[in-house]
Image (spheres, helix red, strand yellow):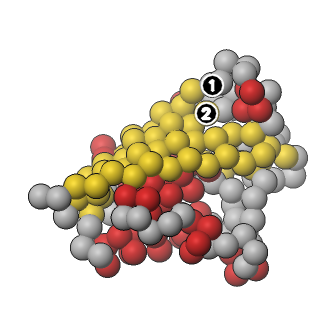
């Protein structure tokens, strides 16, 4: 068996009048993430990790923010397209591990739903998708609640 790993990172600014979507789950909060698509940092980090494992660049290459086609796009739909790129090259996901960094809102009640949604799109079992949440202890822009970021690591197998 051949394996590859990739890591991904994404951050978006919090702003009023936007929905907060993480891992494909809409979370009630007074602020949402600003971005060209739905700005789902968790899903974006996972996509970048998948692409990185195969040296295929990043999501900006496939879904550029300058292209109106992707304005408001559902990141789970984009994730499905990235997964197809991986499958077309003969690879499959072994597992995903990720962490969302946000001061608020509390994400623990939403993590299982995120895992289920991501696993469903990728045709994985939920136990192959790790999602954790932490705060930044009030440090830096994320700690000041100016944004939310996510990190992901993906193991691909062939």
Do we see residue 67 in this rendering? yes
Question: 30 above or below 59?
Answer: above
Return the residue found at the far left: 1
Q: Is residue 116 visible?
A: no
Q: Residue at x 41, y 46 (%)?
A: 153
Q: Nearer the viewer, residue 117 or 59?
A: 59
CA gap, disc 1 to disc 2?
5 Å
- State the image quarter where residue 131 is shown: top left
Point out residue 129 in the picture as x, y percentages from the top left corner.
Answer: 37, 46
Q: Quadrant of residue 86?
A: bottom left
Sequence-wise, which precedes: disc 1 or disc 2? 2
Position of 146 with respect to 4 (left or right) is right
Q: Secondary structure at mark 1?
A: loop
Few, some or many C-alpha atoms within 10 Å of disc 1 (few <14, some 14-19, many ≥20)?
some
Q: Position of residue 29 (x, y in %)?
A: 76, 39
Q: Which residue is mark 2?
A: 101
Label number found at residue 135: 1
| Residue at the outermost top position | 137
The quarter of the rendered structure image containing the C terminus is bottom left
Left or right placement of residue 27 versus residue 152 in this view? right
Q: Is residue 30 left or right of residue 54?
A: right
Q: Residue drawn 43% across and 59% down?
A: 52
Q: Label for residue 13?
A: none
């Amino acid at each position: 068996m051949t394996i590859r790993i990739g890591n991904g990172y994404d951050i978006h600014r919090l702003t009023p009048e936007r929905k907060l979507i993480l891992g494909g789950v809409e979370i009630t909060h007074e602020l949402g993430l600003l971005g060209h698509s739905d700005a789902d940092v968790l899903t974006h980090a996972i996509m970048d990790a998948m692409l990185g494992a195969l040296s295929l660049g990043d999501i900006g290459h496939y879904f550029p923010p300058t292209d109106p086609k992707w304005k408001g796009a559902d990141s789970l739909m984009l994730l499905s397209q990235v997964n197809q790129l991986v499958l077309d090259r003969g690879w499959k996901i072994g597992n995903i591990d990720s962490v969302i960094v946000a001061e608020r809102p509390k994400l623990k009640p939403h993590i299982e739903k995120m895992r289920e949604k991501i696993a469903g799109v990728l045709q994985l079992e939920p136990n192959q998708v790790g999602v954790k949440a932490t705060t930044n202890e009030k440090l830096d822009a994320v700690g000041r609640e100016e944004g939310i970021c996510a990190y992901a690591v993906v193991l691909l197998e062939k």
